[in-house]
Image (cartoon, rainbow, N blue to C red):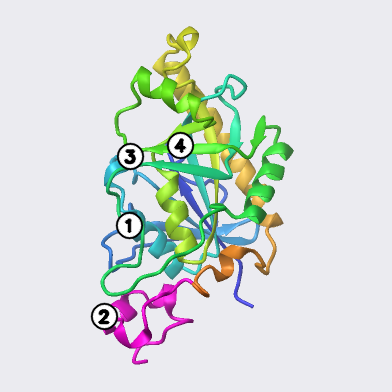
Amino acid sequence: MPEKIVGVIGGSGLYEMEGLEEIQSVSLKTPFGDPSDSFIVGRLEGVKVAFLPRHGKGHRIQPSSLNFRANIYGMKKLGAQWIIGVSAVGSMKESIHPGDMVIPNQFIDQTKGRPNTFFSDGIVGHVSFADPVCPVLSRVLYEAGSKVGATVHKDGTYLCIEGPQFSTRAESRLFRTWGVDIIGMTNLPEAKLAREAEICYATIAFATDYDCWHEAAEDVSIGEVLRILAQSATTAKATIRHAVKDLPEKRECICASALKYALITGKKHIPEKTKKDLDPIIGKYIRRGE
């Protein structure tokens, strides 16, 4: 059985992981270009962890410019079976207060033209995405967040917008009528690509504000948002330390075999270059030269 390896993609406020031991920096090239930054690989609580700052060191890459395919491909190349995506979001519900943690179980896509599939260039695949996050990983994250004393909301819908601008007030009010719980700009492409790569994925989302629908909360200062981000990063790190220990050694969820019946293109029609490029992802189903 392969060693358990957990990927962590840090969002706004989470740019490094303290407590890692046996650290090495790994720079990877992928067929889709360069990831956001070098991967920091080490051990956390004895578990191998690969950490990637989503926006790069110094937060220099805006959401629409993120190379999601390279980031997830890199995690796959490093052997990650699990990915925890950490994200700052706006709250769309009165009951989700700034500083609260949400473990969403659904997404709505309002992005525009972001590459969000590995299956192009002569290969077609359709993975099931009705339940877009790993139920096992989500449960472990919820329990870990509760252990560290966070106010955790289990389940909920994450609305992913294009950005980098925040919503207009009219958009925010419209989105509220859809029944969404939180709003962000990054996690949905990661979830789609992780499913295609047969990696378990779930999100730790921290509310930093009430978006712009909540008129009584409009005067929150940037200083207060930064304070919440710093607090949330500390909580996220503590949650992850607990979670990595509690994940099972063997995966029996739908994520681990998502491609089993998803690849549509006949083997002989897939270009050899595509087979080579996607070997870390499709290699167990389609071998080069077949």
Q: Whole-Å distance between the Cαs marked 2 and 3?
A: 35 Å
- How many numbered circles does the render carry? 4
Q: Nearer the viewer, mark 1 or mark 4?
A: 4
Q: Amino acid at mark 2?
A: Lys
Q: Nearer the viewer, mark 4 or mark 3?
A: 4
Read off the residue under disc 1: 35
Quarter of the rendering containing residue 55:
top left
Point 39% across, 47% down: residue: 54
Q: Nearer the viewer, mark 2 or mark 4?
A: 4
Read off the residue under disc 2: 273
Q: Amino acid at mark 1?
A: Pro
Q: Whole-Å distance between the Cαs marked 2 and 1?
A: 20 Å
Task: Quarter of the image for the N terminus: give it.
Answer: bottom right
Q: Nearer the viewer, mark 2 or mark 3?
A: 2
Please tell me which residue lies in front, 114 or 28.
114
Q: Whole-Å distance between the Cαs marked 1 and 4?
A: 24 Å
Q: Earlier in the sequence, mark 4 or mark 3?
A: 3
The x and y percentages for residue 118 are 35, 65
Q: Is residue 216 magenta?
A: no
Q: Is residue 1 visible?
A: yes
Task: Quarter of the image for the C terminus: give it.
Answer: bottom left
Q: Give the secondary structure at mark 4.
A: strand
Magenta-drawn segment: 262-290
Q: Is residue 131 above or below residue 14?
A: below
